Image (cartoon, rainbow, N blue to C red):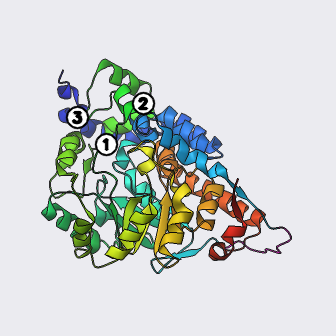
């Protein structure tokens, strides 16, 4: 049954409610702010996000494909590595800074590109890149962001733009031109989304685009008053970097029509000519694929299984990291994401050969739990945990991890 006529944005309701935001928002956000203040780790942020968000949207953020084996494995795999710490190391000050693509960064981890941030909280992408800028972090933006790349002029010290395998070359050229003009230095080509993963939790939650305003979805909206108030009292979001004004509600068919299932390494090499800066291949889990990418001209590889949302049964990125680094050598850039929940996870990835670590769900939990405040809380938690891990393992600086990592992280 078509229920799109129930869409309150079609009535223009947000225009009447917007002036009430300064009065209503502080009231409906009180429980969320209390939960955010009480959070001490990423797991707490996840609970806070679940309580604040619409069930359908939280499920989209939190879920994986099929039986979610890879989703769980992404987290559990870090436990397979033990920290063989050094004692009496005489450390006076921890240095978490690093260099990535020639840019100095204060922290060796950064927010991954994720589509549709305003689905989780109305503050969306600005809450994330402003946090990255204030903390001296890199920032990666999705081509399907709900904020235009032009809004990120200046800002974080290193900006990475993520692109999908799209058919429309004019669309690709237009998006890349906008990103380059906005100062994005690095391009990340996502190669693991040629077929859309089977995300069963979304089906159970009736996650649909366009949304179905069914009694169940309305009931779930009533149970999430802070999220629902944001949704009702702000402008409808669109995917702002597409050359066509594509509203969120029309995205599914549009994206499915754009995905190329026949994309090859030769097509990827052609893309390198459209970007006059470094390009990394995102979605790699095989050492051979990493080697092929480097030989093709990519500046590096991004080890990822798309957060367990694509092929269920894929290995966790941390499991293939050491083999990939051994296969391609020390010079090419290696970025890793997937399953990071703790500062110890970031430490292990760096020690095993990653140049930087991307976080996805953790900062999105923070965003869903409390907008920019939540993103800041997530970054500060991981910063503190990583700093503590460095001190307790006897490592003074991130730059020391590449030379000493084999003595610190051991397979159990």
Q: Earlier in the sequence, mark 1 or mark 3?
A: 3
Numbered label attached to residue 55: 2
Q: Is residue 156 left or right of residue 4?
A: right
Circles 2 and 3: CB distance less than 8 Å? Answer: no
Q: Secondary structure at mark 3?
A: loop
The span from disc 1 to disc 3 (Cα, nearest Å) is 18 Å
Q: Is residue 2 left or right of residue 268?
A: left
Q: Residues within 10 Å of mark 1 (few under 14, many from 20)?
A: some
Say which residue label 1 marks: 234
- Residue 155 appears in view: no
Mark 3 burial class by Cα count in 10 Å: few <14, some 14-19, many 20+:
some
Q: Which residues are magenta?
A: 87-95
Query: Residue 76: horizontal and vertical position, in percent?
Result: 60, 45
Disc 2: CA contacts within 10 A as few (<14), some (14-19) or many (>=20)? many
Image spot of residue 317 (x, y percent): 50, 55
| 243 with respect to 100 (left or right) | left
C-alpha span from label 2 to label 3: 16 Å
Mark number displayed over residue 210: 3
Q: Is residue 96 magenta?
A: no
Most prominent secondary structure in the magenta stretch?
A: loop
Q: Which is nearer the N-term, disc 2 or disc 3?
A: 2
Q: Nearer the viewer, mark 1 or mark 3?
A: 3
Q: Residue at x 28, y 57 (%)?
A: 164
The picture places residue 334, in percent across and down from the top left corner, at 48, 68
Establish if 83 lies above or below 223: below
Q: Earlier in the sequence, mark 2 or mark 1?
A: 2
């Amino acid at each position: 049954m078509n229920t799109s006529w129930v869409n309150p944005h079609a009535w223009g309701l947000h225009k009447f409610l917007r002036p009430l935001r300064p009065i209503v928002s502080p009231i409906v956000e009180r429980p969320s702010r209390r939960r955010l203040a009480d959070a001490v780790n990423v797991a707490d942020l996840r609970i806070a996000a679940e309580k604040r968000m619409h069930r359908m949207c939280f499920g989209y953020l939190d879920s994986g494909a099929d039986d979610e084996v890879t989703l769980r494995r992404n987290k559990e795999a870090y436990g397979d590595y033990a920290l063989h710490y050094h004692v009496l190391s005489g450390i006076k000050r921890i240095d978490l800074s690093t260099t990535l693509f020639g840019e100095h960064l204060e922290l060796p981890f950064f927010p991954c590109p994720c589509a549709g941030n305003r689905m989780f909280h109305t503050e969306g992408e600005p809450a994330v890149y402003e946090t990255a800028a204030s903390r001296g972090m890199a920032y990666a933006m999705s081509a399907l962001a709900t904020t235009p790349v032009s809004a990120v002029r200046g800002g974080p010290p290193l900006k990475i733009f993520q692109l999908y395998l799209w058919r429309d070359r004019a669309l690709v050229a237009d998006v890349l031109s906008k990103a380059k003009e906005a100062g994005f230095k690095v391009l990340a080509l996502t190669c693991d989304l040629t077929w859309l993963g089977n995300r069963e939790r979304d089906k159970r939650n009736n996650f649909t685009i366009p949304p179905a305003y069914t009694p169940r979805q309305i009931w779930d909206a009533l149970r999430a008053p802070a999220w629902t108030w944001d949704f009702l009292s702000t402008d409808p979001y669109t995917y702002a970097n597409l050359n066509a004004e594509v509203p969120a509600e029309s995205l599914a068919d549009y994206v499915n029509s754009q995905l190329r299932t026949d994309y090859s390494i030769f097509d990827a090499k052609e893309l390198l000519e459209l970007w006059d800066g470094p390009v990394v291949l995102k979605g790699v889990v095989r050492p051979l694929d990493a080697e092929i990418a480097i030989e093709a001209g990519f500046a590096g590889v991004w080890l990822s299984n798309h957060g367990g949302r694509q092929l269920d049964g894929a290995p966790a990125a941390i499991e293939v990291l050491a083999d990939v680094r051994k296969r391609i050598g020390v010079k090419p850039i290696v970025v890793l994401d997937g399953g990071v929940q703790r500062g110890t996870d970031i430490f292990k990835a760096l020690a095993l050969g990653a140049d930087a670590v991307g976080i996805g769900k953790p900062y999105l939990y923070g965003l869903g739990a409390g907008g920019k405040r939540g993103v800041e809380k997530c970054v500060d938690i991981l910063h503190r945990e990583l700093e503590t891990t460095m001190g307790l393992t006897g490592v003074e600086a991130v730059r020391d991890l590449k030379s000493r990592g084999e003595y610190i992280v051991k397979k159990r």
